[in-house]
Amino acid sequence: MDAQVIVVGGGPAGASTAWHLARAGVDVLVLERARFPRDKPCAEYLSPQASRILANMGALEPCERSGAAHLAGMIVRAPNGSRIQGDYAASHGFTGFRDRGLALPRPVLDAILLDRSRAAGARVQEGVRVSDVVRDARGAVRGVRVQDALGSAREIRACVVVGADGLRSVVSRRLGLGHTARAPRRIALVCHYRGVDGITSYGEMHVERDGYVGLADVGGGVTNVAMVLPARAVRDAAAHPAQLFDRWLGARPHLAPRFVQAERTSPVRAVGPFARHARRATMAGAALVGDAADFFDPFTGEGIFAALRGGELLAPAVLDSLGAATPGAARRALARYDTARRHAFGGKWRVERLVGLATAYPMLMNRVARTLARRKELADLLVGVAGDFVPPREVLSIRYLAQLLLF
Ligand SMILES: Cc1cc2nc3c(=O)[nH]c(=O)nc-3n(C[C@H](O)[C@H](O)[C@H](O)COP(=O)(O)OP(=O)(O)OC[C@H]3O[C@@H](n4cnc5c(N)ncnc54)[C@H](O)[C@@H]3O)c2cc1C
């Protein structure tokens, strides 16, 4: 064996998995296609509860030192102009690891996280692309096939392979575990600006009839602008993302004036469609984590938390699997991660889908927004769920949903 565990992908999910395993004394090899720092199209916001895992990994202090912005909550504008404000510090009785979210550029965040996994003892090889998984005669995964920068191929073997290789995960595809959802089919256009007018310490979401756009301070006077549009409306997105972006923004009278003095400081990058889900995230000798396992929509902005938390949930199952006496016991140990994921994320998956439904139907969104604009305590609860510190059951209860829709 070349390592006990191979982690494919060194983004937040791979770095967290590698950190948790290396800390427990496991020989981990991270194989990363890119060379860091690398960019990743993202709105670059981290929920208050993500800071708990960052602190645990020793990554919070370097993130703060890099100049990360602090976010006090979220402001959502509905298509009818209703304005909802939800604060992380609220009187509902739930408190997170801290009462603010963080926002910082992904090249900075991801490099810090990968460095933390190195510091914990993980071996990291950058510029190495995994092209396939290797299986034994019984079908159990026993390693990966890789191509280095010069194009030469070789096999690397391990007891467990973790697919942390993001939305287009090659590990998930080769194992037949994931599938792209038919709906919602959306694409995103993401870029940075300097000098956007009226940016505060609240993340902003502007929901329109034909998509939504998020604005947030990511530190250093830079604003992240992430636009999410139905894929059918944007067939030319890949070829001309900047024109499409400018056209859409220019047609919003409440937003366009805020960009008149602003300067775009990065290319507009297109990504999507992104809704995908793995029915299960484990099989003999392999597991998926982060976007490789599932991602729904950026609206509730928890992909980074889910990636970090996924690594935290997966590590004990991998450890048990490595220590198991028989192949069957090893497979059952890994499968406990599937149960842990459902337990940790099941409620949030339901909330994400309800929010996704509301953003796709403007009349529903307007109705919900009118209520939330009047009832701040309900908005605070919803923002707390998105912030990963209020239990999803608080907003999935019949009582909460009835208040939203009937009043
Ligand atoms: C438009 C948009 C906005 C978003 N905004 C937010 C937000 O504000 N907050 C939030 O929390 N989440 C947000 N997300 C989600 C978030 O970006 C992801 O959930 C998060 O990046 C998942 O981390 P990951 O480690 O699973 O995958 P990634 O960050 O994609 O990392 C995967 C890594 O695997 C590597 N890799 C891929 N293939 C291979 C291969 N074959 N061999 C080796 N290496 C490989 C890649 O180079 C990459 O480094 C957003 C997503 C989108 C699309």
Image (cartoon, rainbow, N blue to C red):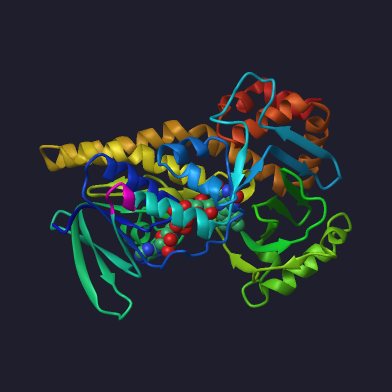
Give the magenta part as a residue range. Answer: 118-122
Task: Give residue 170's quadrant in the image.
Answer: bottom left
Q: In this view, does 38 lie above or below 314?
A: below
In the image, what residue occupies the spot 33% across and 38% down? 337
Taking depth in this image into account, of 92 and 64 the one nearest to the observer is 64
Residue 15 visible in the displayed image: yes
Task: Name the residue furthest left.
Answer: 325
Residue 181 visible in the displayed image: no
Q: In this view, does 2 lie above or below 296?
A: below
Task: Name the residue furthest front.
Answer: 65
Q: Is residue 346 above or below residue 157?
A: above
Percent position (x, y) of residue 129? 34, 69
Percent position (x, y) of residue 176? 35, 57
Percent position (x, y) of residue 27? 21, 50
Task: Name the residue furthest bottom.
Answer: 150
Q: Does the magenta stretch include residue 326?
A: no
Q: How many marks?
A: 0
Query: Could you tell whether 299 is left or right of 292 in the image?
Result: right
Percent position (x, y) of residue 332? 23, 37
Q: Name the chief secondary structure element in magenta.
A: loop
The quarter of the image holding the C terminus is: top right
Query: Could you tell whether 199 is left or right of 181 in the image?
Result: right
Q: Is residue 119 magenta?
A: yes
In the image, what residue occupies the spot 55% across and 45% down? 64
The quarter of the image holding the N terminus is: bottom left
